[in-house]
Image (cartoon, grey):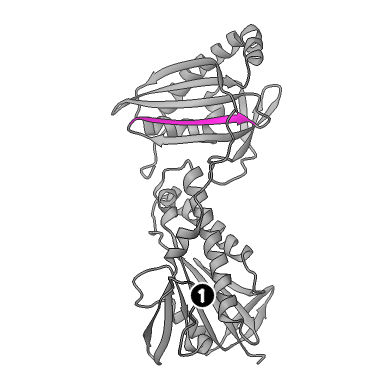
Amino acid sequence: MENRGLLFIPDISGFTRFVTEMEIEHSRLIIQELLEILIDSNQLGLEVSEVEGDAILFYKFGTPPSTDEIYHQIEKMFYAFHRHLNAYEYRRFCQCKACVSAVKLSLKVVTHYGEFTGYSVKTFQKLIGKDVIVAHQLLKNNIEEHEYWLATPNLIGDNPPEGLKQWMHWDKSVKETETGKIPFHYAQLSKLKDEIPPESPPSLELPKRIKCLSVSREFDVHVKKLFFTTVHFEFRNQWLEGVKKIDGVDHFIPGIGSKHRCVLENEEVFLITSSFSYDPETRISFSETEEKGKHAMYFILEPLGESRSRLTLELCVPNRLMKIMFLLFMKGKMQGQLTRSMEKLNELMKGIVLPVEF
């Protein structure tokens, strides 16, 4: 039995192969994060042989786990995969094609039992053997849907298991190869998504929102260009007066719940992105709240036509005492800073080229 074992390959599909720089980078990072989630969901003691593009080759030598154990492993990965995508869809800011289509990604799992062996290349355990080839051949098949569990008779016998889920139905098919036919069974998994609870929005905004200051300006640009320039941290110190830099961003694509450090002239402030709403036809808004809830800045963007839009910056605090202190000691200075910031933003946008995919 030492050269026989389980081959277990979860494979992600659904991304169009985008050609623009931002989309390629974002799709790569999204897939990387999802692959890490699948590896972290391993509860069967599976070993990783290698990551193959959008798939992971897991294996485990010895007697195979029961079909019930294998199903629960698939179920755990499926839940973690789609919970992450649901959260990402709710929280993301980016509007590129890769980020917008991420929620449509699907997961299929191919399982097979057979003979194979391994050899070491530095820290990697590579697998070789006829059954490794068989498992990979089964990734390409005639199943129309792309969210399923595929299992060979070598693993589950000629009669697929019953009773795993009331709605689960098994079909059978054959993979034609140059060396012969490979029979397999498969069951769709899409109904598992109905068992995933909806994403609960995090409570990150101020419990009580009291407006202290509001500054607006109109710009001769499309609202999408205004949004692109204001939401991206790499531009912030070029237009928002008093900001030296923003760093420490805790996620590669900022969105609701992401944290960053704003370095000012004499202090640093840690901010959490606390809300986001996107409708370029009517209104786009997002907010950043100081991590201890001392204040929040709201960015409100409104389209005024095809090539004109308005930005409103609103500073809010959580109680009336803080508002009184702000009005007495800080309003005049900050109002001047934000007014000048709007002018800098107008100049900055003259050199901004909006990515075609945004």
Q: Against 212, is 108 above or below?
A: below
Compared to residue 174, the image places residue 329 above or below, namely above
Query: Between 169 and 353, which is closer to the camera in this rendering?
Result: 169
At which x and y percent is residue 65? 61, 81
The front one of 91 and 356 is 91
User: Quick one: 185 or 126, which is closer to the camera?
Assistant: 185
- Residue nearest the observer in this picture, 225 or 141: 141
Task: State the quadrant of the C terminus.
Answer: top left
Residue found at x 56% / y 34%? 274
Q: Which residue is mark 1?
A: 164
Q: Amino acid at mark 1?
A: Leu
Q: Residue at x 61, y 35 (%)?
A: 272
Q: State the image coordinates of residue 153 (x, y, percent, origin top left).
A: 48, 88
332 lies above or below 98: above
Q: Main secondary structure of the magenta part?
A: strand
Number of marks in the image? 1
Look at the image and tell me whether residue 228 can be seen.
Answer: yes
> Residue 148's spot in the image, x, y percent?
44, 71
Say few, some or many: other residues with alpha carbon within 10 Å of mark 1 (under 14 / 14 to 19 / 20 or more).
Answer: few
Q: Is residue 286 magenta?
A: yes
Q: Quadrant of the N terminus?
A: bottom right
Q: Quadrant of residue 206?
A: top right
Rendered location of residue 211, percent (x, y): 54, 17
| Magenta extent | 282-290
